[in-house]
Image (tube, grey):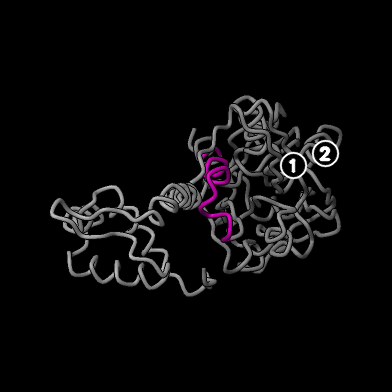
Amino acid sequence: MRNINIRSVDLNLLVAFDALYKERSVTRAASRIALTQPTVSGMLKRLRDTFDDDLFVRTSHGIVPTPRADAIAPRVADLLDDIGLLLSPDDFDPASSAFTVRVCGSDYLLHTILDTFAESVLQTAPRARVSVLPRPAEGIARQLESGEIDLILSDRELTVPDLPARFLYRDDFVCLSSYADIADGDDISLDRFCEREHGFVDPTGGSFHGPIDDALEAVGRKRNMVLAVPGFAMLLQLMKSRPMLAFVPVRIAAAFDHGFSRVRTPLDLPHLEIVASWHPRMTRDPKHKWLRETLVSIANA
């Protein structure tokens, strides 16, 4: 028997062989695989050349397989089944699957969606593990590609170019005050606003400039920034012992029992658009799709 180079074999020929073997008729085989009879006849000729055997012999009752066809038919059927499974999407059952999901985001996201996301994943998938990581300073695309990170959540302005992204929700800013002489709902003038002390959240704790300062610069003003901390919990705790103003996202203000006044300012405030990003290779992965849909469901709750 001569050797066959697999690279030279059209796997569609095996589909035709399987149909011919099961139907014992070129006409019925052609109908089974939605091809014309001349096309299947041509494929049978190529099958005979490939296997160096007649494979099927015409009779008055249709075609009859040769011993060679009988020998390879079960293996061809098994091979086609395996290929079908290979090409079919994997089923993903979170309730029975063991996996680890690694998601990263800022301190803000820890308090607004990542905590609920982790709880939801662990409740629905009891064999799962959730790792919540801080946003890396660099190399995000590489870590997503290598699987070190599955998802990254961020403001749209901080997303990595060319990565798929899914919008989750929008959040606005509110100004909180721990000054005793500023009541809840007070309108505060720009002069008064700028002379008071301000606190600010920056993940590095080293910056005293943010989106609010950009809005102030647009009108030629600057606020009296005295405190920069890496997290909102720390900021709100320090505001209890020292009078300050601070802009925080609305969801942060709702997440903490702070008791501070909400102040109206004359500023045109920016807003946040939170998105989830991932590597393109994971777009069609069933587990990853489930994780993204879980995020969207929580964001819209």
SS majority, magenta: helix
* Quarter occupied by residue 221: bottom right
Mark found first going from the N terminus, 1 or 2? 1
Q: Which percent across, then down, holds residue 277?
A: 59, 55
Residue pointed to by mark 2: 234
| Residue plotted at (23% across, 51% down) | 24
Eyeballing the image, is 198 above or below 97? below
Q: Is residue 183 visible?
A: no
Label 2 crowd (10 A; few <14 / some 14-19 / many >=20):
few
Residue 124 within the magenta-colored segment of the rendering: no
Number of residue marks: 2
Residue 293: image location, x then y, percent:
51, 41
Name the secondary structure under disc 1: strand
Q: Nearer the viewer, residue 162 or 217?
A: 162
Residue 285 magenta-highlighted:
yes
Give the numbered dot on residue 301.
none
Q: Which amino acid does label 2 sit on?
A: Met
Which residue occupies 72% across, 64% down? 142
Tell me: residue 254, above or below residue 64: above
Q: Which contiguous range is marked in magenta?
A: 280-294
Q: Mark 1 points at which residue?
A: 132
Left-right relation of 229 to 75: right
